[in-house]
Amino acid sequence: MTELPGNDVSGDDRTGKSEAPASASLCQSCGACCAYSPDWPRFSTESDEALDLIPIMLVDLSQSGMGWTGYRCAALSGTVGCHTECMIYTIRPDVCRACEPGDDACNMARARHGLPSVSLAASSQDLDP
Ligand code: SF4
Ligand code: SF4
């Protein structure tokens, strides 16, 4: 079984939405898109080799996407709207890389969790404390 990758969040990290530090900071305090729908983190264009890196215990039974525990992706740690982290950030599925802070999918997910919308412009600004 593949080992879970380390949770070193230095540099470009978090739920994996953007490499920009400000956006990463926003995502680290959010995680809403990772707790939106079990139909969302589906596998699509990944190679078999890339999918093989994802620990099987985090994959759904049909092996068509990420597993889901309760209301959230099995790879999400932390508290939505407070502090979250993707446990498989470096090997996350392509759909996770496509969702960007401030885009329509992002704000739809944030609204589901009662979080305010963010703009694409705001997400690129310095949001660090
Ligand atoms: S919903 Fe938006 S801000 Fe929240 S983690 Fe996803 S991309 Fe980042
Ligand atoms: S794999 Fe990571 S980035 Fe993708 S939905 Fe799950 S926790 Fe979020």
Image (tube, helix red, strand yellow):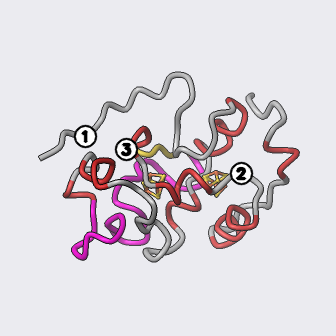
- The CA distance from mark 2 to mark 3 is 19 Å
Q: Secondary structure at mark 2?
A: loop
Disc 1 packing (10 Å; few <14; some 14–19; many ≥20): some
Q: Is mark 1 within 8 Å of ligand 2?
A: no
Q: Is residue 94 above or below residue 121?
A: below
The residue pinned by badge 3 equals 88
**In the image, residue 84 lies at what x, y percent?**
50, 46
Which amino acid lies under the numbered mark 1 shown in the image of this protein? Leu
Q: Is mark 2 within 8 Å of ligand 1?
A: yes
Q: Earlier in the sequence, mark 1 or mark 2?
A: 1
The residue pinned by badge 1 equals 4
> In the displayed image of the protein, which residue is found farthest to the right?
121
Label 1 with label 3: CB-CB less than 8 Å: yes
Disc 2 packing (10 Å; few <14; some 14–19; many ≥20): many
Q: Residue at x 28, y 48 (%)?
A: 49
**In the image, residue 91 lies at what x, y percent?**
39, 43
Disc assigned to residue 106: none
Q: Earlier in the sequence, mark 1 or mark 3?
A: 1
- The CA distance from mark 1 to mark 3 is 7 Å
Q: Is mark 3 within 8 Å of ligand 2?
A: yes
Q: Which residues are magenta?
A: 59-82
Q: Residue at x 68, y 29 (%)?
A: 21
The residue closer to the viewer here, 107 or 41, is: 41
The residue pinned by badge 2 equals 101
Label 1 with label 2: CB-CB less than 8 Å: no
